[in-house]
Image (tube, rainbow, N blue to C red):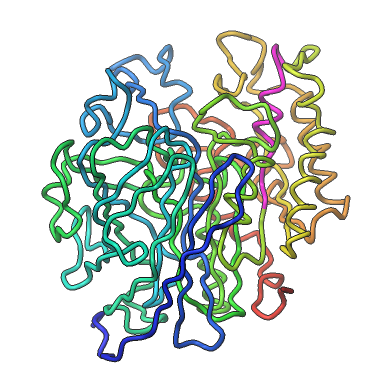
Amino acid sequence: MLRSSLQLPRAIALVLVAVVSLAIGPSAIADQGTSNSANPHWVASWATSPAAYFVYAAPVAQNQSLEFSPTKSAVANIQPDLAFPFPNSKTTGATAVDQTIRSIVKPDLWDNNMRVRFSNVFGNQPLTLNATTVGLQEYAGNLVQGTVTPVTFGGAKTITIPAGQEVWSDGVRLSWVDRTDNPLLQGRNLAISYSIQGDSGHMTHHSGANMTSFITAAGSGDHTQDLDGFAYEYTTTSWFFLTAVDVMAPADTVVVCVFGDSITDGTHTTLNTNDRWANVLSRRLHDAYGNKVSVVNEAIGGNRVIDPVVDNATAGPAAVDRLDRDVLGLSGLTHVIWLEGINDLGAGYGQAATATPVFEDPVIHTPENIIAGYQNVVARLHSNKIKVYGGTIISALGMNNPEQGWDLNQFPDFLASADNGPVIDGHRQQINQYIRTSGLFDGVVDFDKATTDPTTGNMRAAYLPNSQFTQLPWDYLHPNHAGYNAMGLAIDLAPFAPGLQSH
């Protein structure tokens, strides 16, 4: 039974403190809490990176021949037409108006003391939430009876978040979490429901959630207490405003952040099954060390190590720009596994890679400057006593991705013989050699070795067929379920054993 038999309340200190301003300007307000465990503190149990404010894009037209259709290089995420839940998207701009969002997330650790963080960092006006609850997802938009728990902010039901800022809730006591190792909770999803009062303005979001969440109709008001999902008429595969869930855990808990681009974010994973390589790693770590470890994901599809990036792109700010907020802002962080760089390489060319490459910016997009980006980020993490493990970049031979500048239609020779040519792949291998041998990182995770066929230089054939988009051509970059599983199994668990981290 999920309901706790404990009746004694625990003291929760509700002290709001300002967090150091970040490079892009947001500040955060944090609440401090207590727990029955020895020397407890807040640790990240789930997180995602806010990438941009939502801009409506109509879905790709249906019933087109795949051979000549834009779907040939498909949108990477299954996203419903969000003009229905956000009907002003096509006119005045995409905003939420007097409606409720029920975001579905999977905590990596459970505790009966939890808090959540909301972000308005890409907002253009104050965002007001007039009610928030957390509860255990039953299925779809439905919640388990007896688990719906109100969330407060400084003791109040309503919170207004200024544009450019983030806010933590108070610690909330979950009476239905009887113990952290309850097997009936492991792997279950948490539903965070929040009612938006008035017009939200620009909606800070993470586009590629690979998880279905639920939205009520515009003007429908507060449905945060609903057990049934009837009012949640619409779905989305993005997370809006919500960026983190913390729990109270012992001081020696290991918190591992996986950081990077779409290959870590989970593009082409199976929708709603949590089968990213980070999820495989999480399962292995919990099997080995129980509840002494938490794995959270701060990757963004399309993200790059260094600038320039397109303004308000769903790929988000570059890693060097978002590190403070997205990674160092995590509670209890001890380790980072970082896999990134393929988007920097792909964006650096203006013509076929089989010919002489033309860089958009030869200063920025050389391997040497990508490596300088690595050095910048690792130095900042090390200065905060965070251990960093470098992931080698996996093969992208055969990739066709116009959004990153590799466009078969524009440059017919670009993917000649299903090969992106020796230039990009040579630079990828140059960077991988640096990751393996430079000593910059505390350790190396050889994702390249785990996924590449040494006889072809491409991704192993078994990892190429799409798990999510079975009718679309393979993109030769994002692994399928089997490939992500292989990546998660390639990681040595020993460096993440509790008790090894320094503070």
Q: Give the residue displayed 18% in from the left and 43% down from the top.
A: 216
The spot of residue 143 in percent (x, y) is 20, 62
Q: Give the residue displayed 43% in from the left and 33% down from the top.
A: 53
Q: Give the residue displayed 32% in from the left and 51% down from the top.
A: 103
Residue 253 in the image: above or below residue 99 = below
Rendered image quadrant of residue 489 = bottom right
Residue 259 in the image: above or below residue 319 = below
Q: Is residue 237 magenta?
A: no
Q: Is residue 463 visible?
A: no
Left or right position of 181 against 348: left
Left or right position of 122 against 214: right
The spot of residue 468 in percent (x, y) is 40, 40
The spot of residue 278 in percent (x, y) is 54, 57
In which quadrant of the rendered image does the N terminus lie?
bottom left
Residue 306 in the image: above or below residue 323 = above
Q: How many numbered circles are shown?
A: 0
In which quadrant of the rendered image does the C terminus lie?
bottom right
Rendered image quadrant of residue 252 = bottom right
Q: Is residue 408 visible?
A: yes
Q: Give the residue displayed 27% in from the left and 52% down from the top.
A: 194
Which residue is more in the foreground, 470 or 54? Answer: 54
Which residue is more in the foreground, 244 or 236? Answer: 244
Outermost right residue? 438
Left or right position of 93 against 482: left
Give the extent of the magenta segment.
338-352
Q: Is residue 340 magenta?
A: yes
The spot of residue 232 in percent (x, y) is 17, 46
